[in-house]
Image (cartoon, rainbow, N blue to C red):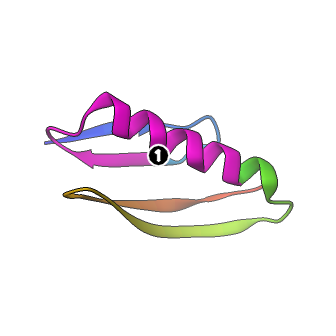
Amino acid sequence: MTIEAHLADGRVLEFPDGTSQKVIDKVVLELVNESRNSSQSAETNHTATFGKFEVTIEGKYTK
């Protein structure tokens, strides 16, 4: 199973089991800040690696 984090803009982030809350919070904060700094609509398909974890984020958001 995966750990899901639901963002206010409708995106759902999936993290592997065992991901620490600290890592999840960091990723969510970075994405929220990134969204605030963007003034365009965007298709998101982003993969990030945090230590041994790889996180893929898919979705669409509009500012």
Give the percent coordinates (x, y) of residue 50. Answer: 32, 55
Q: How many marks?
A: 1
Asked if residue 17 can be seen in this view, the reply is yes
**Above or below for 14 versus 4:** below
Give the percent coordinates (x, y) of residue 30. Answer: 58, 47
Can you identify the residue that label 1 sits on? 27
Asked if residue 63 can be seen in this view, the reply is no
Q: Magenta residues: mostly which secondary structure?
A: helix
Q: Is residue 9 left or right of residue 63?
A: left
Quarter of the image holding residue 20?
A: top left
Label 1 environment density (alpha carbons within 10 Å; few <14, some 14–19, many ≥20)? some
For residue 42: magenta? no
**Above or below for 29 versus 46:** above
Choose between 33 and 16: the one closer to the eye: 33
Q: Residue at x 69, y 45 (%)?
A: 33
Q: Is residue 47 left or right of residue 33?
A: left
Tell me the amino acid under the disc marked 1: Val
Q: Which residues are magenta?
A: 12-34
**Above or below for 20 versus 34:** above
Give the percent coordinates (x, y) of residue 59. Answer: 53, 60
Residue, far right: 39
Residue, far top: 21
Choose between 39 and 21: the one closer to the eye: 21
Q: Residue at x 45, y 33 (%)?
A: 25
Q: Residue at x 71, y 52 (%)?
A: 35
**Above or below for 46 versus 25:** below
Quarter of the image holding residue 21?
A: top left
Give the percent coordinates (x, y) of residue 3. Answer: 26, 37
Kindly state the secondary structure of the residue where label 1 is placed: helix
Quadrant where the N terminus is found in the figure: top left
Q: Residue at x 59, y 49 (%)?
A: 31
For residue 19: magenta? yes
